[in-house]
Image (tube, rainbow, N blue to C red):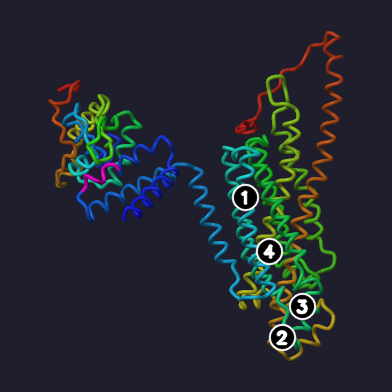
């Protein structure tokens, strides 16, 4: 799962969640709740995606009173393209055996919401 | 409660320092999200994930991983070598050994980093440093097992007479051999750290040559005397303790031949100096490094294997009986008389014989590197003299309108200085 695109299933789910609204900055806890990952899994994924330039991160400009500044994440154009390519690869993946169960789609990105992807 | 929180925050700040600078934002990010998580188990799980992120990021730093590995190995050696019985000379010696060797290994590494720079980036340098440290740490518990027998004289009876007869004088209340052991170990650690550091400018190929030649030398010496080297003929189970045997003679030849062969191989493998290439001194330095490393590795290998075998014999009677089977242990005058009809005394005589054959490894550890230093030192002097003679002749050859300097051949693969500053 995910081997065709070079991403693990969990990485693809994070990338897909961020690609739903590419212009929107997201917080770690909200993202963790959406994709159902724990912090110890989510953050290493975000670190790897940021290292590859697929996700950008920044600190909140003005923190809420009494709360520390939060770190925010947004998918980059390369990240959107990678998510779309992964979605295409997932769709094009042939069934291994006629009796095999259909595999769940990990990437829920709406292709029409992803700019720059051929339809 | 506020004090507890402050202490927690201070602990977190100091732990975050273990994380590489470019990753610290991410660790802070996990903590910054924690107030958003519902209190209780969920928040605790979120923070636990943060600890996992810290651990992963910290282990990315090579230094942290190495320090943890060393701490684990040192703790294992201390646990295995820490003597249980209180208030005896052997116990004091053993505790001093454990503490001092661990402190030497840790302290000299820190000093070497400042003086000699970081470890070489080649695989040979890293492997040698790890293997050297592992060997010295493994030697400590083995030596301590031997000393619990050798430095604990029986209170009286036949055992005391056996002890005096077999072990000889100099054991039981003498710190000098312990101090000598610790000085030798310090010298070994320093030599390993120098040879494997970047500033030593020892080529990876030289390290590999020295390590292989040293392994051959150590294995040969261990095969000749697997149970140590002593006066009793029990030392060599398959040589039957012959006074002059071809195998010990060959081992002695190998002691001188192995460092010389390694030095010649390293010299030939290293590229000759040229205008753009490495200076001539670097090539000569490979001679010393290869020869010294050969005998260091050889001595360490035979010492660790031999002392380990003796320690295993002392802790496992079946092994001692099996290895000493058929050997009369009659090299010491008067032993037969004491052992007549006394199985307990016979067992003790085996123990003390095995233990008394271990101290010569300390002599081996001192002599081997000295032999290498003398031989390679002579070689270096000869090479330096011939290089100086060539240097004196070369301007005259160029001035006479000769063909000029012949281009140096391309250096062979792996012989270049891959990790010099």
Say what secondary structure mark 3 lies in. loop
Q: Quadrant of the N terminus of chain B?
A: bottom left
Separation (CA) of disc 4 from disc 2: 24 Å
Q: Is residue B333 above or below residue A52?
A: below
Separation (CA) of disc 1 from disc 4: 27 Å
Q: Is residue B50 above or below residue A60?
A: below
Q: Position of residue B373 (x, y in %)?
A: 79, 45
Q: Quadrant of the C terminus of chain B?
A: top right
Q: Sequence order check: which comes first, mark 4 or mark 3?
A: 4
The answer to whether any part of residue B86 appears in the image is yes
Q: Which residue is mark 3?
A: B329
Say what secondary structure mark 4 lies in. helix
Q: Sequence order check: which comes first, mark 3 or mark 2?
A: 3
The magenta segment? B32-37
Q: Sequence order check: which comes first, mark 4 or mark 2?
A: 4
Q: Which numbered circle lies on residue B254?
A: none
Residue at x-position 33% and y-position 37%: A47
């Amino acid at each position: 799962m995910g081997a065709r695109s070079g991403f693990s299933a969990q990485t693809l789910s994070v990338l897909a969640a961020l690609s739903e609204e590419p212009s929107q900055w997201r917080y770690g806890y909200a993202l963790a709740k959406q994709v159902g990952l724990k912090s110890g899994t989510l953050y290493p994924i975000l670190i790897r995606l940021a290292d590859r330039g697929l996700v950008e991160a920044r600190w909140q400009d003005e923190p809420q009173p009494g709360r520390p500044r939060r770190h925010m994440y947004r998918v980059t154009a390369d990240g959107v393209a990678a998510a779309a390519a992964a979605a295409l690869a997932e769709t094009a993946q042939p069934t291994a055996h006629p009796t095999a169960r259909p595999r769940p789609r990990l990437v829920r990105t709406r292709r029409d919401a992803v700019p720059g992807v051929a339809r | 409660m506020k004090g507890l929180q402050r202490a927690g925050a201070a602990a977190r700040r100091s732990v975050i320092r273990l994380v590489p600078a470019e990753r610290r934002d991410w660790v802070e990010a996990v903590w910054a999200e924690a107030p958003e998580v519902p209190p209780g188990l969920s928040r605790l799980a979120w923070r636990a994930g943060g600890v996992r992120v810290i651990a992963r990021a910290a282990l990315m730093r090579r230094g942290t991983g190495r320090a943890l590995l060393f701490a684990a190995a040192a703790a294992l050696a201390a646990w295995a070598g820490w003597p249980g019985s209180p208030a005896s000379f052997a116990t004091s010696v053993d505790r001093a050994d454990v503490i001092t060797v661990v402190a030497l290994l840790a302290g000299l590494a820190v000093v070497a980093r400042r003086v000699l720079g970081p470890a070489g980036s080649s695989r040979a340098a890293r492997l040698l440093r790890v293997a050297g440290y592992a060997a010295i740490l493994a030697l400590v518990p083995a030596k301590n097992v031997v000393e619990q027998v050798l430095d604990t004289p029986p209170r009286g009876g036949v055992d005391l007479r056996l002890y005096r007869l077999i072990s000889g004088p100099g054991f039981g209340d003498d710190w000098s051999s312990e101090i000598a052991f610790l000085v030798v170990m310090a010298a070994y650690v320093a030599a390993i750290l120098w040879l494997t550091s970047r500033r030593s400018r020892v080529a990876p190929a030289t390290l590999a040559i020295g390590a292989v030649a040293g392994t051959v030398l150590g294995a040969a010496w261990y095969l000749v005397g697997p149970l140590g080297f002593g006066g009793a003929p029990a030392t060599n189970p398959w040589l039957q303790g012959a006074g002059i045997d071809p195998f010990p003679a060959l081992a002695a030849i190998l002691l001188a031949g192995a460092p010389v062969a390694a030095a010649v191989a390293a010299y030939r493998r290293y590229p000759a100096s040229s205008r753009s290439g490495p200076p001539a001194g670097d090539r000569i330095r490979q001679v010393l490094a290869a020869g010294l490393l050969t005998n260091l590795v050889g001595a360490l290998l035979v010492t660790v294997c031999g002392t380990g075998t003796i320690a295993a014999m002392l802790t496992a009677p079946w092994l001692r009986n099996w290895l000493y089977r058929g050997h009369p242990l009659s090299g010491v005058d008067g032993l037969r008389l004491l052992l007549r009809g006394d199985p307990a005394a016979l067992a003790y005589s085996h123990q003390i014989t095995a233990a008394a054959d271990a101290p010569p490894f300390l002599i081996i550890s001192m002599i081997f590197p000295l032999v290498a230093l003398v031989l390679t030192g002579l070689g270096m002097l000869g090479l330096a003299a011939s290089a100086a003679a060539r240097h004196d002749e070369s301007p005259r050859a160029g001035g006479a309108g000769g063909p000029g300097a012949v281009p140096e051949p391309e250096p062979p693969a792996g012989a270049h200085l891959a990790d010099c500053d």
